[in-house]
Amino acid sequence: MPIFARFRALPDKDKAALIRKLLVNGTPDFDYFYLIGLSTLMATLGLLLNSSSIVIGSMLIAPLMYPILGVSLGLVMMGNSTELLQRALNTLVKSLGAGLFLSILAAFFFGDEATYHTAEVMARTEPSHLHLLVAMVAGAAVTFMLARPEWGDALAGVAIAVALIPPLATIGIGIAAANALIIKGATMILLLNLFGIITVAVVIFLLMNLQEKEDIAVSTAKREDERKVNEDKVVAEVAEQINIKRDSETVIVHEDITVK
């Protein structure tokens, strides 16, 4: 069918750019987790305040779409190796874990019985087949948008974040409130959304024939992992220099006190 042929007919350079984009932006470095933390905290506070505008704002900074679509890419390319899939899954699990932990803390310290049951919170506790359909539509739209350089990544990211960040924050609120119904409902919505996005993205990546670009994916992942290691070394060296300077200043102050 012509519509399927359009996916296959995408320029190779756009397909390669899509793969690099997913792996580079899905690298589990400080920048990535910093944004995950801020977006989840913002979503949690927005839910507690019953503010849809704050919740929407949290979606604008959430980078969750990259490891999620990275899982889809890993599934497409797992014929020869599961390394890419394991990398994306590891990042996704850590992201959800970190976001959940922060949402629990925020809800525990800043929430109360009234804010635990706002309309924004309760709206994300009733799973439906419509949530799955929305997630599938979002996955179909985002995978195509990312392969077209003329479309912005920010808009695509919102489509994914809307399906994941608020339910994740709602789970944290449910745990802080010790409310099993909130936890169960939000968890079901989160799982439905994950399944819908990942499944549709796998289908579209297969239509794009991305499995033939595995060499690009492997080399990009390796380069990003090396960059992360080097970056961590630089940060460790700076931290050591700060500690040495602080220790020397402490010694000087102690000597001055002794002399006096």
Image: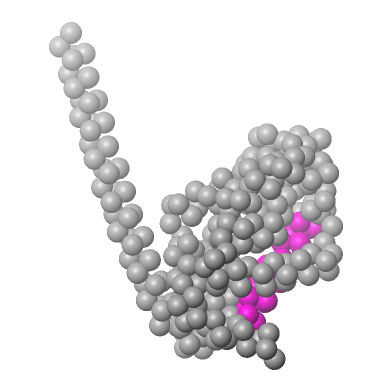
Q: Is residue 96 magenta?
A: no
Picture quadrant where residue 154 is located:
bottom right
19 lies left or right of 59: left
**Residue sitting at 78 percent across and 70 percent down?**
133
Give the residue furthest to the top: 260
Picture quadrant where residue 139 is located:
bottom right
Q: Is residue 67 visible?
A: no
Q: How is the image coloured?
A: one colour
110 lies left or right of 217: right
Picture quadrant where residue 229 is located:
bottom left
**Residue situated in front as seen by the camera: 31 or 134:** 134
**Residue situated in front as seen by the camera: 152 or 198:** 152
**Residue situated in front as seen by the camera: 209 or 258:** 209
Give the residue furthest to the left: 259
Residue 248 at x, y percent in the picture: 20, 29
- Position above or below: 26 against 55: below
Give the residue furthest to the bottom: 1
**Residue sitting at 67 percent across and 89 percent down?**
2
Count the marks: 0
Residue 135 at x, y percent in the picture: 72, 67
Q: Is residue 194 magenta?
A: yes
Quarter occupied by the C terminus: top left
- Position above or below: 14 against 257: below
What residue span does the magenta drawing correspond to?
184-204
Magenta part, dominant SS = helix
Q: Is residue 138 visible?
A: yes
Residue 113 at x, y percent in the picture: 80, 36
**Residue situated in front as seen by the camera: 56 or 75:** 56
**Residue sitting at 27 percent across and 37 percent down?**
242
Residue 166 at x, y percent in the picture: 70, 52
**Residue sitting at 43 percent across and 52 percent down?**
30
153 lies left or right of 257: right
